[in-house]
Image (cartoon, coloured by chain):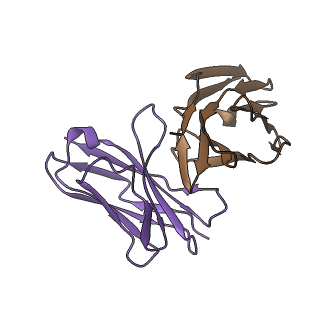
Amino acid sequence: GAGVSQTPSNKVTEKGKYVELRCDPISGHTALYWYRQSLGQGPEFLIYFQGTGAADDSGLPNDRFFAVRPEGSVSTLKIQRTERGDSAVYLCASSIGTGELFFGPGTRLTVL
Amino acid sequence: AQTVTQSQPEMSVQEAETVTLSCTYDTSESNYYLFWYKQPPSRQMILVIRQEAYKQQNATENRFSVNFQKAAKSFSLKISDSQLGDTAMYFCAFMKGGKLIFGQGTELSVKP
């Protein structure tokens, strides 16, 4: 049983570019979460999915951020027109619904 | 709104001693879940212990235990017989409605 995986582990991009971050949850986990973590801070909730649909997207900071989970498994977080303030570690987690979240190692995004 | 407050940004403890990390939260709900997560320098977040609000008995997992005071909205973590491998960021988290909200974290250093 592999854990949650995230690709890439590091992404460096230029201001204004588009990026996609991928998350592969644990097989069979119906819930999938995205968090953003800035240096020295706690993870900040962005969005979570139950199956294919977004159950709560209240944490997405603006319309440049979008996430999909078309087949109820892999999810992609998409950020348009990146800004320097988007630089952070993006964490993905999955859950079978018991309340315990299993986290991936994160993607460190740097916007120059 | 639901918030989680960790008032100790940093703590240190001598190996084999006991340390307590504090957490308070704010909610109007009566049924919810509380968690402590550990994030070592490797970055991957792992669950330490969980508590269901309707249970009066404090949760215990080996060297880790909680002091859950529902009326005071307090949820502290006690680590007994501290080990060097306990060095990490510790996050208190609150779950309601499927969404996990984290505190700002406490950086714990265990010294030999």
Nearer to me, A25 or B88 = A25
User: Against A29, is B24 above or below?
Assistant: above
Q: Identify the residue at horizontal 81%, vertical 31% (top origin).
A: B80
Nearer to me, A77 or A51 = A51
Q: Colour of chain B?
A: brown
Q: Colour of chain A?
A: purple
Residue sticking out furthest to the left:
A16
- Taking B33 as reference, is B65 left or right? right
Q: Identify the residue at horizontal 69%, vertical 45% (top origin).
A: B30
Percent coordinates x, y for residue A51 in the rendering = 49, 73
Q: Identify the residue at horizontal 24%, vertical 57% (top origin).
A: A19
- Taking A20 as reference, is B28 left or right? right
- Taking A112 as reference, is B102 left or right? right
In this figure, what is the number of numbered marks? 0
User: Against B22, is A37 above or below?
Assistant: below
Q: Tell me where residue B83 sits by quadrant.
A: top right
Percent coordinates x, y for residue B94 in the rendering = 60, 43
Nearer to me, A43 or B110 = A43
Q: Tell me where residue B8 sits by quadrant.
A: top right
Percent coordinates x, y for residue B13 in the rendering = 70, 21
Residue sticking out furthest to the bottom:
A71
User: Against A13, is B28 above or below?
Assistant: above
User: Against A97, is A11 above or below?
Assistant: above
Q: Identify the residue at horizontal 55%, vertical 68% (top origin).
A: A26
Nearer to me, A76 or A12 = A76
* Quadrant of the snapshot with the N terminus of chain A: bottom right
Percent coordinates x, y for residue A106 in the rendering = 44, 51
* Quadrant of the snapshot with the C terminus of chain A: top left
